[in-house]
Image: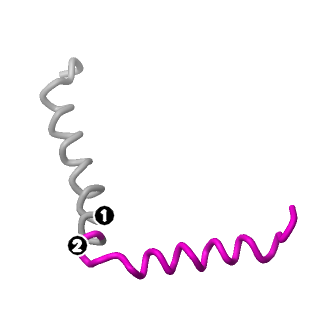
Amino acid sequence: MPGCPVVPLLSVAFCGYLLAGLPLPTYLMFAGWPALAPAVYLGYSRHRSRLR
């Protein structure tokens, strides 16, 4: 692969630069959705399960 050690390092650095520019509510939403999704899934599956 041409530029093997340089291209991946630049990609990681650029992604870090993009992440550093995001506002705090974005990080909070990113943490909130994965925490909320299992609760919704488990609540829905308890009421719709045929294995009761």
Q: Position of residue 14 (x, y in %)?
A: 57, 76
Q: Main secondary structure of the magenta part?
A: helix
Relative depth, front residue between 40 and 24: 24
Name the quadrant of the N terminus. bottom right
- Find numbered disc 1 in the image and state the secondary structure of the residue it sits on: helix
Which label number is shown at residue 30? 1
Query: Is residue 6 found left or right of 13 in the rendered image?
Result: right
Name the quadrant of the C terminus. top left
Name the mark nearer the viewer: 1 or 2: 2
Q: Is residue 16 magenta?
A: yes
Q: Position of residue 23 (x, y in %)?
A: 29, 77
Query: Is residue 51 found left or right of 1 in the rendered image?
Result: left
Q: Amino acid at mark 1?
A: Phe
Q: Position of residue 30 (x, y in %)?
A: 31, 64
* Residue displayed at 17% across by 34% down: 44
Q: Residues within 10 Å of mark 1 (few under 14, many from 20)?
A: few
Q: Which residues are magenta?
A: 1-26
* Residue displayed at 19% across by 48% down: 39
Which of the 4 quarters of the picture holds residue 28?
bottom left
Which residue was labeled with disc 2? 25
